[in-house]
Image (cartoon, grey):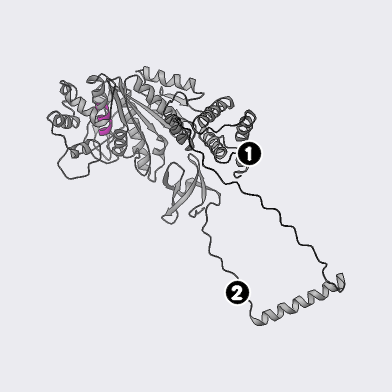
Amino acid sequence: MPSFDKGAIVTHAAYGRGTVLATRHRGLEVQVSFGRFRLWMPERELAPVRSGLRLVEETHAPSKPPADAAGDATADESSLDQLMGILYGKGGVPSVPPAETPPEVPVQEPRFTPTLPGRDMDQASAIEALRLGLVPTTHIDHWTVGRTWEIGRIRDFLRDWTEGAILIEGAYGAGKSHLLRYLGRDAAEQGYAVASAGFDPSEATAAFPKKAFRRLVQGFCMTVGGETLTFRPFLRAVARHPHWEDVLGDHPLLSFLLHRLAKGREDEETWEWIEARWTGRRPLPTLHDYSTCANIYCNLLSGLSRAAVELLGMSGLLLLLDEAEIARNTIYRYQVQRGLNFFRGLILTANDDPILLDEDIVPGNPTTGLETGLIYSAHNKTRYTTAIPSYLKVAFALTPGTLQSEFRRYRESIAVIELDILNAEQLHDLFDRILQTFAAVYGTTLSPRGRDRVFHLIMLSGRVSTTRGFIKAVVEAMDFCRFNPRGDVERLITQGSA
């Protein structure tokens, strides 16, 4: 069984390469950084790649030999002189002219290249996003290359009310998060409220729906009458509607909040409660933080969606869930099951499955639905949905082969978009757009021959396994040219240093 030291480079079947940060439980659990996230995982799921960072012990100069050892060394040197005299004559070893010291090559100091006056701030911020390997969200159409078919699929999904969920599948760096943001932008333009969240085992794991709900609340946004509303202004607008009680008057949680807002009795503690952040002891309706409480938070989301449509005239509520495959990467098996239960509850709620309204709930450990097998909270057996239709849509982004079979079992007709890396022509188009942005912001340009040479070297350098890796390689090369206009950018690309 391999054991990993801090700093070791390891690989995981789903997440790729990472660096070991720490171990625990005698090395059976390992904390690994995969760049954008870090997590604890069983040691058996990892394989060593090569040595990573290692702590180097301080070295000490060898001590001087004792006097008798020095005498022996003198004797050895005398014998060696006699031998060399036999070989070369009395003159001993022939003299060798000292090697010529190569002339020092002056190191070119990087120079500061300021941005051009009157530059477009959107383009400047775009470069900052590109340095992280991310496609900028501003002018998202301009930075979306080669995804015509995929964009058509997500637009069909928004218009199709017979399907409530969609999967966007691709390797890390393939553009899943970017396509999710594109979907969110299109949905907002079509009148949807949009809530987005990314899963992280250390903060928002799908096994604990309250944490996921908290992230969705933080990422909630909608536009009504030209005004952009976040979560709190949205609920205030709902409470001002004269007929809100017809829609949510009997809701076990939202009605409590809306009554207070309608009477002007809002306070920070009440807001923190509905935003799943309240940890105090004030008597408020309980929002449990157990892994068995997916029914509570699916119900809340369906209630918010109905309020957006039936009271404020929106098209629905779209949930964007990134890094969904994290649900499988937990230490305990029950957490995997509870995370998948939450996802299944969302899919059935978004697809208006009528069984959610009247299935029998069977007490047990855990409490489950008789027909669906969904897990219900034993403390609050509220239904997964408030009504049909729920006006809810859900989009999941995940890596290949992690959860697609599970989602297919939940709903065979679920739409799937599989992302591949862009082809050479599409990457060249993206390359040209990045260079145009550098020219507009910094005035940094390449000759036509230099452009072709840099592009082909990057394509051959092994850094185009993902779109993100390609973007970062191009930006790194252009930043080098910006600060070192006479430097050897080709050597930087091929050898990693210049």
Amino acid at pointer 2: Ser
Q: Quadrant of the C terminus?
A: top right
Quadrant of residue 217 within the rendered picture? top left
Q: Nearer the viewer, residue 238 or 341?
A: 238
Q: CA distance from mark 1 to mark 2?
A: 46 Å
Q: x and y percent of residue 367 in the render?
A: 26, 37
- Give the mark toward the camera: 1 or 2: 1
Q: Is residue 198 magenta?
A: no
In the figure, 360 relative to 494: above or below?
above
- The answer to whether any part of residue 411 appears in the image is no
Q: x and y percent of residue 231 in the render?
A: 26, 31
Q: Secondary structure at mark 1?
A: helix
Q: Residue drawn 24% across and 25% down?
A: 357
Q: Say which mark, if any, is on residue 207.
A: none
- The residue that mark 2 highlights is 63
Q: Nearer the viewer, residue 231 or 46?
A: 231
Q: Residue drawn 14% across and 41% down?
A: 283
- The residue that mark 1 highlights is 490
Q: x and y percent of residue 465 in the render?
A: 55, 35
Q: Is residue 301 magenta?
A: yes
Mark closest to the chain's N terminus, 1 or 2: 2
Secondary structure of the magenta portion, mostly?
helix
Total marks shown come to 2
| Apparent side of residue 93 relative to residue 365 in the rendered image (left or right) | right
Q: x and y percent of residue 473 in the render?
A: 55, 37
Q: Residues within 10 Å of mark 2 (few under 14, many from 20)?
A: few
Amino acid at pointer 1: Glu
Q: Residues within 10 Å of mark 1 (few under 14, many from 20)?
A: some
Magenta segment boundaries in residue numbering: 295-303
| Apparent side of residue 365 relative to residue 468 in the rendered image (left or right) | left
- The answer to whether any part of residue 226 appears in the image is yes
